[in-house]
Image (cartoon, grey):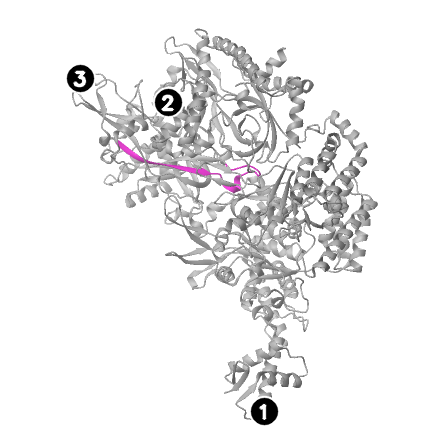
């Protein structure tokens, strides 16, 4: 937005370096092109009627001298352009404006990419030229910006793409011209705020901030990173307005490379040094400085992240906030630092920045939906080949699971479980049937003796996944896990800071010492682990954030050692409502077995002398594993096959049957869901688009293993799912009921006494019962009877009702 | 002596060689210097910034600097080649910009910024500080030898100051000659003297200004109370090989160009008013271009990573020459070990078991990482230290005398709540603000828990304790980048002195059992140190540094034996030995073998390791009984 601002005149002398005019060229962006092309190209009323807006993002207009290649004798291969007869190119480039424009117009009119998959494609007919549809959109919406994917341009015309990358400052205005001509040709009556500006994005040349080098200067680049700072709005002068103090003659001077050339002589009256700047008739544009830092994923280990300065102009100002992850397309600039106008020495260092042409937030949608497009890691074709080759190996599942944390010995089923967790199930959307999203993430709880490398396993997983978080139950509060509202000290603005759970969206949240977590913190997890969302109502901010995170938790038994005589719930004292949300619960116990000890000893000894290199060879590289998982997560989306569904149904029915034989429920729909997720994850491991019976078999196996470990009733030795779902085994519940009945009988046998002594009753019951009755059991029985409105307990007396 | 002159005038060489611009000269310069530095210990001739204050060194001379990379700034694009124009005659001259901060040109010339001849090149700036916690003896010994060779009779005194003036005059003539060659005309002596005057003015002006307009620049040393110059080290090649916290020795051209200070002042003036400049906040300017008098620049010609900083050892142990040194020392290893053990036993009040463990601790080092598990760390918790006594302080002093770098962390509530442990990124100044835990590899960190009283830890305190715990367990520190954390692996030997068992995790707890209670601790400890001959002390130092660098292996045979042993022990009493115990015993065996100079595990050593462990555990058991409650 071009604004006129009242800025104190004194300031200007500092903002603009008023230099003596050398050979200044007052050219507007539209003076590109040969005279002939201008005559035939711009007579449309629409173009004329719509004001041109400066493009500060392209920098000042360089003097676009055109050079005739014939007369210059420069032997350059521009065969395609010969048909145009004239071989004029912009000085310093090989860009011929007319042909460049024509080619771009052809691109706009003809480019069709039926396979294109982009999030903003909604409503586009993929079989029609896409950019023509975009122009139509501009006509309807009135936003005069045309975003052009460089990848499309590259597939359409390689040479044009190269020119765009190498000479963006010259080529983009040409594109603007071309787009406007087409647009106003089609929609002559359209009223736009200003002429259409073309914004290319997704230039493939540079992706990483670290790889920027002097060769990229003045070229179009795309890099990704995280915004760490943004400045306030800065008004930048685009056009200075001068008035002669003597004759009141006025003139306008455009900014050139950040400077305004002050006219030293009035053209009208020839008085020297009579021209004065009239600041409130000068033109300004908005500008903002943004600091972008390398994304942590792109960085080599052991180095600090690089930063780069961005300049955003006009409507791109204030589009991003610190903390946003963005992809930026722009022109890389290097400006010499002038030490002092009086001293001729110059600091030999350049200041570099990027003039932003296009932003794309990569995490904006993370809070609202699935952003597979931008999340996708770029894999080279060779890498994909390697991964696919790997996936064909019959033992890939075992291979991967053994590559997982090789320093931790054995515990193969646990590793397999974690591996499946890393892959995750397929995401299903049942929103239209009212059930909302189906959880695809697999949650795992590890419990067991201290010192069985649970933490190490968690650390490993945390280091393996790109979006992992590691917290300890002891140290984390509900706030630290969810989100909190913070006041930015600079802007006094309230900012929602996200905690570990939100940060690990689409990743894994590792929680150590899960049992030490306090009640209120744990309650947050209920929502996260089933609904995969987080609701926040704090400081006037009410929102629901996505937290599609898998949870890998580790818990220690309440007594320092795992008590095999107690159930899982009794050992770790976690509410069963939470436990039932874990797909797999594993026990990591110290097995007491000679053969195991022997293998463990050998494994540990080898750690202490073998060289790192030798060990690496044996196992799959962590990087390969990481890529394998990333690839499967983003590209493989298995669906259940007919046989697999059948197998799942059977498995579920079997599970229920086992229980019903003994009068208890041994499986709930939640377990079926778990089975499906596990089977899908296993199919992903094989890069298979179909879930088959083998996958179901493995899911069943793992599920059974985990149950065997965690849901065995220590009193009966039978696997009993209700330990996890209700917190108590069926037999225990039965026993409780029996005791209550016995107590009722006992009280009734005492005749019509309105009140009984508590201790007396307890002793009587103990004397009568053939099994040991603890105080807790007695109290529980009392409570059960109280619930039936049979009695009430007040202090030390029991009253009958 | 031509050779000596060379070292003082490297830029001269660079300048003379660049009269004819060609791409080869860069290579030649580096090779030339590499050659020169190899010649008969020539490295000792080069003055060191660690030793000599900046203002005694000549600008544009060759210097060396031993330092740790504290932060890495963004890459810099500079004018590798630039062209100057004389507006009057239109004469054009090409210049080279490498190894300099300022693109110079004569008074009658100006730089043509749009010249097609301009070549933009890239270099990387590291912010380097002297190795944190470097022991005094390291400095003394390394510069004792240097001084001896530079000027045998005079140590570094004001007399040196005088000499440098003489040389200054000598110097002034040379650049002028250079300039004459460059400009072809009109280079006069005054033109060259001028910057000198400016320097004094600038620095004087600076001293006047700085207290008024801004707080003194924080030089960002990781440890409080550190001294020494911080440097901006400009690296021209293969900077990807260097990492944060690497210890480097760099040879390069010292740049304290007064113009840099002028730049600084000018910019500071303009920042107040110029909104464009506001974006690069004044704070960032202060940090990224501090006055050269305070933070000199070094343009690196040669940089090497150091394996260790012990001056008594050859810098690189793979060379032929060093191999003989190693084998000579190894042959007399056992008496050194015995003496060291005796010395430490005395220091630990007659407890030889604790002394044994202390030796093992001091030669431990992370030699590999298996996925997240660091191997070879051996954190010892020395419990049973008398509370509020100077004992722990003296133990630290003794360790300081033995290892090249160390730090004593007093674990008080106050310290925990208020100090900066974890380095964090300051986005306003765009730099990594250092913390106590930003230490170079193989630094000894002595945590004194006897100082800890009951009290409330605040958020910072909890973070600090967590970070310390992570450092011990995983040998990594998560630096805080405010939007995310970044993990930096480290290799720090942590010794915790405490009364009971430490609240921090440790690999092994040794309970101190003093055999003697000296009536005057201070006197006892002091006499202990004075009683050791310097030559013996030096042997201890070599011993501890050298053994860290040795390789180690276990034969199949011994592996079998260890296996059997483990199975057997588990059979008898599965509670008594867990996988953790085996881990620890293997570690003890490793360091026990190495401490005797053996690079393979023998059965005897394994049994000895088990024996040591058994002794240690018995003590802990006793302690439990004495206290009647669990530790």
Instruction: Give the CA separation, mark 1 to mark 3.
Output: 125 Å
Q: Is residue B323 left or right of residue B366?
A: right
Q: Are marks 3 and 2 on the same chain?
A: yes
Q: Residues within 10 Å of mark 3 (few under 14, many from 20)?
A: few
Kindly tell me whether residue B35 is visible in this rendering: yes
Percent coordinates x, y for residue A611 in the rendering: 71, 40
Magenta-span inclusion, residue A297: yes
State which region is magenta.
Answer: A283-305
Helix or strand or loop: what does disc 3 sit on?
Answer: loop
Q: Is residue B290 above or below residue B200?
A: below
Q: Is residue B239 above or below residue B448?
A: above
According to the picture, the residue beneath numbered tag 1 turns out to be A750
Helix or strand or loop: what does disc 1 sit on?
Answer: loop
Which mark is in front, 2 or 1? 1
Helix or strand or loop: what does disc 2 sit on?
Answer: strand
Percent coordinates x, y for residue B199 in the rendering: 46, 19
| Labelled disc at residue A269 | 3
């Amino acid at each position: 937005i071009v604004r006129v601002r009242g800025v104190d005149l004194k300031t200007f002398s500092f903002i603009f370096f008023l230099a003596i005019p050398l050979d200044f060229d007052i050219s507007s962006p539209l003076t590109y092109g040969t005279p002939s092309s201008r005559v035939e190209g711009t007579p449309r009323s629409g173009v004329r009627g719509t004001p041109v807006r400066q493009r500060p993002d392209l920098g000042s207009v360089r003097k676009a001298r055109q050079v005739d290649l014939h007369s210059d004798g420069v032997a350059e291969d521009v065969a395609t352009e010969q048909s145009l007869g004239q071989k004029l190119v912009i000085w310093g480039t090989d860009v011929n404006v007319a042909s460049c424009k024509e080619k771009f117009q052809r691109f706009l009119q003809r480019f069709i990419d039926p396979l294109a998959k982009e999030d903003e494609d909604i409503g586009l007919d993929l079989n029609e030229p896409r950019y023509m549809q975009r122009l139509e959109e501009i006509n309807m919406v009135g936003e005069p910006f045309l975003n052009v994917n460089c990848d499309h341009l590259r597939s359409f015309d390689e040479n044009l793409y190269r020119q765009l990358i190498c000479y963006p400052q010259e080529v983009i205005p040409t594109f603007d011209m071309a787009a406007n001509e087409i647009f106003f040709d089609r929609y002559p009556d359209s009223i736009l705020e200003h002429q259409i500006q073309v914004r290319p994005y997704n230039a493939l040349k540079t992706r990483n901030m670290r790889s920027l080098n002097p060769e990229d200067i003045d070229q179009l680049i795309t890099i990704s990173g995280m915004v760490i700072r943004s400045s306030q709005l800065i008004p930048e002068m685009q056009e200075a307005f001068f008035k002669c103090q003597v004759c009141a003659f006025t003139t306008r001077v455009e900014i050139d490379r950040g400077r305004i050339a002050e006219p030293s002589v009035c053209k009208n009256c020839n008085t020297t040094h009579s021209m004065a700047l009239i600041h409130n008739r000068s033109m300004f544009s908005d500008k903002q400085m943004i600091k972008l830092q390398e994304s942590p994923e792109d960085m080599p280990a052991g180095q600090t992240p690089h930063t780069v300065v961005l300049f955003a102009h006009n409507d791109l100002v204030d589009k991003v906030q610190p903390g946003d992850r963005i992809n930026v397309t722009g022109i890389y600039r290097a400006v010499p630092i002038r030490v002092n106008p009086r001293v001729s020495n110059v600091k030999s260092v350049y200041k570099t920045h990027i003039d932003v042409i296009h932003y794309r937030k990569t995490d904006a949608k993370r809070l609202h939906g699935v952003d597979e497009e931008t999340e996708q890691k770029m894999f080279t074709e060779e890498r994909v080949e390697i991964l696919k080759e790997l996936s064909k190996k019959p033992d890939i599942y075992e291979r991967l699971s053994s590559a997982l944390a090789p320093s931790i010995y054995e515990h193969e089923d646990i590793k397999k479980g974690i591996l499946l967790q890393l892959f995750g199930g397929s995401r299903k959307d049942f929103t239209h049937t009212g059930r909302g999203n189906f959880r695809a993430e697999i949650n795992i709880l590890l419990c067991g003796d201290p010192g069985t490398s649970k933490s190490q396993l968690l650390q490993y997983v945390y280091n393996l996944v790109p979006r992992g978080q590691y917290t300890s139950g002891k140290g984390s509060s509900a706030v630290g896990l969810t989100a909190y509202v913070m006041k930015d000290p600079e802007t006094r603005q309230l900012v929602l800071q996200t905690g570990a759970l939100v940060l690990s969206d689409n990743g894994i949240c590792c929680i150590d010492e899960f049992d030490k977590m306090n009640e209120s913190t744990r309650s947050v997890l209920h929502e996260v682990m089933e609904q995969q969302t987080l609701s926040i109502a704090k400081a006037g901010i009410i929102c629901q954030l996505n937290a599609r995170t898998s949870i890998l938790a580790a818990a220690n038994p309440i007594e320092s050692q795992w008590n095999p005589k107690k159930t899982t719930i009794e050992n770790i004292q976690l509410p069963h409502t939470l436990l039932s949300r874990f797909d797999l619960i594993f026990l990591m116990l110290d097995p007491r077995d000679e053969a195991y000890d022997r293998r463990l000893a050998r494994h540990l000894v080898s750690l202490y002398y073998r060289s790192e290199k030798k060990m690496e060879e044996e196992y799959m590289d962590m990087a390969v594993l990481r890529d394998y998982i990333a690839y499967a997560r983003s590209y493989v989306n298995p669906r259940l096959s007919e046989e697999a569904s059948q197998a799942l149904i059977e498995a579920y029915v079997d599970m229920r049957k086992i229980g019903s034989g003994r009068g208890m429920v041994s499986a709930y729909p939640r377990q079926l869901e778990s089975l499906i997720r596990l089977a899908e994850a296993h199919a992903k491991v094989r890069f298979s688009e179909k879930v088959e019976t083998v996958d179901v078999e493995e899911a069943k196996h793992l599920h059974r293993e985990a149950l065997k470990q965690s849901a065995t009733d220590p009193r009966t030795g039978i696997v009993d799912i209700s330990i996890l779902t209700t917190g108590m085994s069926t037999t225990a519940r039965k026993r409780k009921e029996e005791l209550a009945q016995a107590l009722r009988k006992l009280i009734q046998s005492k005749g019509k006494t309105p009140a009984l002594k508590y201790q007396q009753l307890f002793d009587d019951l103990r004397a009568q019962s053939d099994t040991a009755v603890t105080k807790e059991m007695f109290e529980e029985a009392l409570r059960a009877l109280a619930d039936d409105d049979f009695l009430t307990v007040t202090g030390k007396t029991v009253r009958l009702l | 002596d031509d050779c000596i002159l060379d070292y003082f005038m490297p830029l001269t060489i660079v300048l003379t060689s660049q009269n004819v611009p060609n791409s080869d000269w860069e290579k030649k310069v580096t090779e030339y210097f590499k050659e020169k530095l190899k010649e008969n210990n020539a490295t000792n001739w080069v003055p060191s910034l660690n030793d000599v204050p900046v203002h005694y060194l000549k600008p544009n001379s060759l210097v060396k600097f031993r330092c740790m990379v504290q932060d890495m700034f963004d890459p810099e694009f500079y004018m590798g080649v630039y062209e100057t124009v004389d507006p009057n005659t239109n004469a054009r001259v090409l210049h080279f910009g490498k190894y300099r901060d300022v693109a110079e040109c004569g008074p009658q010339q100006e730089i043509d910024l749009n010249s097609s001849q301009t070549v933009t090149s890239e270099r990387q700036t590291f912010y380097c500080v002297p190795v944190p916690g470097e022991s005094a003896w390291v400095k003394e010994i390394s510069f004792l030898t240097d001084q001896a060779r530079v000027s045998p009779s005079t140590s570094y005194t004001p007399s040196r100051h005088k000499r440098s003036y003489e040389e200054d005059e000598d110097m002034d003539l040379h650049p002028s000659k250079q300039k004459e060659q460059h400009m072809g005309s009109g280079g006069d002596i005054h033109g060259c003297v001028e910057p000198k005057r400016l320097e004094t003015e600038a620095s004087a002006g600076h001293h006047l200004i700085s207290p008024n307009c801004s707080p003194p620049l924080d030089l960002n040393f990781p440890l409080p109370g550190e001294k020494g110059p911080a440097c901006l080290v400009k690296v021209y090649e293969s900077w990807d090989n260097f990492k944060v916290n690497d210890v480097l020795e760099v040879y390069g051209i010292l740049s304290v160009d007064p113009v840099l200070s002028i730049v600084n002042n000018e910019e500071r003036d303009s920042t107040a008013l110029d909104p464009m400049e506001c974006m690069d906040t004044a704070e960032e300017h202060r940090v990224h271009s501090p006055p050269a008098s305070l933070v000199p620049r070094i343009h690196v010609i040669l940089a090497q990573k150091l394996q260790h900083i012990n001056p008594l050892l050859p810098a690189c142990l793979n060379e032929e020459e060093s191999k003989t040194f190693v084998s000579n020392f190894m042959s007399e290893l056992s008496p050194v070990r015995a003496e060291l053990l005796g010395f430490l036993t005395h220091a630990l009040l007659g407890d030889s078991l604790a002394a044994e463990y202390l030796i093992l601790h001091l030669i431990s080092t992370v030699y590999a990482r298996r996925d997240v598990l660091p191997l070879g760390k051996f954190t010892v918790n020395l419990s049973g230290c008398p509370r509020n006594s100077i004992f722990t302080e003296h133990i630290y002093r003794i360790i300081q005398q033995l290892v090249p770098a160390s730090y004593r962390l007093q674990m008080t509530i106050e310290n925990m709540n208020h100090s900066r442990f974890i380095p964090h990124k300051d986005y306003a100044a765009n730099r990594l603000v250092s913390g106590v835990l930003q230490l170079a590899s193989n630094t000894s960190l002595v945590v004194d828990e006897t100082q800890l009283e009951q009290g409330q830890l605040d958020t910072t305190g909890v973070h600090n304790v967590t970070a310390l715990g992570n450092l011990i367990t995983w040998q990594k520190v998560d630096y805080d980048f405010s939007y995310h954390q970044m993990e930096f692996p480290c290799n720090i030997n942590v010794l915790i002195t405490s009364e009971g068992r430490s609240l921090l995790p440790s690999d092994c707890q040794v309970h101190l059992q003093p055999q003697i209670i000296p009536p005057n601790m201070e006197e006892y400890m002091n006499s202990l140190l004075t009683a050791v001959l310097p030559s013996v002390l030096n042997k201890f130092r070599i011993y501890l540094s050298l053994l860290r660098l040795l390789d180690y292996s276990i034969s199949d045979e011994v592996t079998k034996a260890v296996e059997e042993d483990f199975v057997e022990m588990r059979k008898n009493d599965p509670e008594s030995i867990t996988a953790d115990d085996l881990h620890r015993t293997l570690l003890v065996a490793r360091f026990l073998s190495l401490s005797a100079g053996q690079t393979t595990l023998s059965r005897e050593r394994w049994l000895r390791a088990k024996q040591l462990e058994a002794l240690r555990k018995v003590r802990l058991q006793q302690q439990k009984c004495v206290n009647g409650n669990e530790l």
